[in-house]
Amino acid sequence: MRLQAASPVNLNVGGATVYSLMQWHHVVATVSGTIGKVYLDGNLDGTGDVGNVPPNALDIFIGRAHPANGGGVIEWFNGIIDDIRIYDRALSDLEIQQLYSLSVMPPSLQMQEDGANLILTWPLSAQNFSLQTTTHLAAPNSWTTLTNVPAIVNLQNTVTNPVSDGARFYRLKQ
């Protein structure tokens, strides 16, 4: 992630983290005075001087490099961009962390019956989640963590269990 301001010279603020591909990320860039900051997943990831950025009517480029960069070659972001917000002030660290915590969705658990087996899949990006099972939803302490090591199939964690008699419930627990 990079924040670039046009002043007499181009000033950049780059993030320090090498972000993971095929995973959703929350990215925020702020400018307050001459200081630009870049946040990744709720955490400050880079800061630097962007010079004086006065109010102006210049175009904003989100998801692509400015056409004047790279000898006229336009570079596009290869991914999905969602929920773009532009504020008239720089958000505080706390506000950015709150926005990030609101946007983190729990991973979805998918189930498919295949003969005598039940195939359970969830996103590979769902780190720090364990697969749990119970036969009694009314008993809150009845959940047990499955010890099956997930296989990775099509960028999904995948566990295969035999179909059992009676009701069995599954969940992902962080």
Image (cartoon, rainbow, N blue to C red):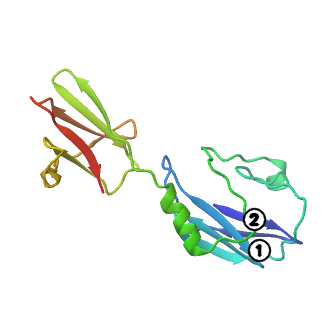
Q: Residue furthest front?
A: 138
Q: Is residue 112 above or below residue 64?
A: above
Q: Which residue is mark 1?
A: 50
From the top left corner, tell me how far across and down residue 14 is, in percent. 65, 67
Which element is circle 1 on?
loop
From the top left corner, tell me how far across and down residue 160 is, in percent. 21, 34
Residue drawn at x 79%, y 47% is 73
The C terminus is located in which quarter? Answer: bottom left
Which element is circle 2 on?
strand
166 lies left or right of 33? left
Q: Is residue 135 above or below residue 88?
A: above
Q: Is residue 155 above or below residue 72?
A: above
Mark 1 belongs to which amino acid? Answer: Val
Which sits earlier in the primary sequence, circle 1 or circle 2?
2
82 lies left or right of 166? right
From the top left corner, tell me how far across and down residue 89 is, in percent. 73, 70
Residue drawn at x 27%, y 36% is 120
Q: Which residue is mark 2?
A: 4
Whether tag 1 and tag 2 are in contact, CB under 8 A, the answer is yes
The N terminus is located in which quarter? Answer: bottom right
